[in-house]
Amino acid sequence: MFVDSHCHIDFPELREKLPEVLDAMRANAVTHALCISVNLTDWPGVMAIAEAHPNVFATVGVHPDYEDTPEPSVDELVRLSQRDKVVGIGETGLDYYRMEQFADRSLEWQRERFRRHIRAARQTGKPLVIHTRAASVDTVRTMREEGAGVAGGVMHCFTESWETARACLDLGFHISFSGIVTFRNAKDLHEVARRVPLDRMLIETDSPYLAPVPFRGKTNQPAWVRHVGEGIAALRGIPVEEVAERTSENFFRLFKITEHASA
């Protein structure tokens, strides 16, 4: 079985055809999915899906580069995380990719938001889901300063260097690979996927984005996480069943899901 550890099935592209999306998961042996929060305004929609389906879980958090959105406090994140089916804090982190649009001011607002998520995760004991893009040095530094390793978590849709992966592994984090790992030109990422220990690895779609080969360029969906697993198995020269089993076990252990609810 496979688990999609990071998806956005509450986004319009997938929410509008959710029964088909869930049917496709079952047909592809994808038994569970984690629907990720990106802002508090849309979070009730994330929760509605998670609460309606026993094999879908949720996080609570605000994406690092969402500007015009209610800012979460530590207390609010802690309070919301107590809802049933909420298993993690995030998606949080740092994203400097669009630096030019922030050129006239400091990015300290991103760093402070990230710190609040880490503090909430430490209070609740729920793992962090961390996004980092063009900001790996500051991301790892902030994780160390705030004691993110106390909560643990996952570096989602990992695209950074082995050195960054190793720093995150040293902090007790898992590394999650998306469809990018199936892209032919992602040579550096292929090497990271070969080196990350299997007991610290997750797989994801980040759907509706980043569809894996052979669906690259199409609207992604959780059913296609199996192709991420197949890509990693090919890179490591191991059976895909081993990747599926190990990454699924890691998911349940990390997010403290003790009852493997079925679809």
Image: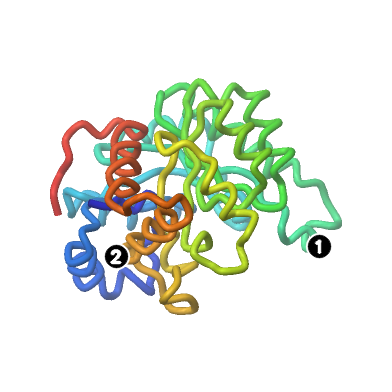
Q: Mark 2 points at which residue?
A: 223
- Hey, which quadrant is residue 208 in on the image? bottom left
215 up-or-down from 45: above or below: below
x and y percentages locating residue 20 in the rendered image: 21, 73
Q: Residue furthest left?
A: 262
**Amino acid marked by disc 1:** Glu
Which residue has dot 1 on it? Answer: 100
**Residue drawn at point x = 18 percent, y = 67 percent:** 27
Q: In this view, does 95 lie to the left or right of 181?
A: right
Write down the quadrant of residue 124 in the picture: top left
- Residue kind at label 2, given as amino acid type: Ala
The x and y percentages for residue 60 are 42, 43
Closest to the camera, between mark 1 and mark 2, is 2
| Side (left or right) of 87 relative to 259 | right
Graded by Cα atoms within 10 Å as few (under 14), some (14 to 19) or many (20 or more), the crowding at tag 2 reads: many
Residue 263 relative to residue 114: left or right: left
Task: List x then y, in percent, for residue 233.
Answer: 40, 54
Q: Which of 79 and 192 is in front in this view?
A: 192
Residues under labels 1 and 2: Cα distance? Answer: 36 Å
Numbered label attached to residue 49: none
Write the residue at 40% across / 34% down. Answer: 199
Q: What element carries label 2?
A: helix
Where is residue 24? Give x, y as percent.
22, 69
213 shown above or below 59: below
Q: Residues within 10 Å of mark 1 (few under 14, many from 20)?
A: few
State the residue in front, 99 or 216.
216
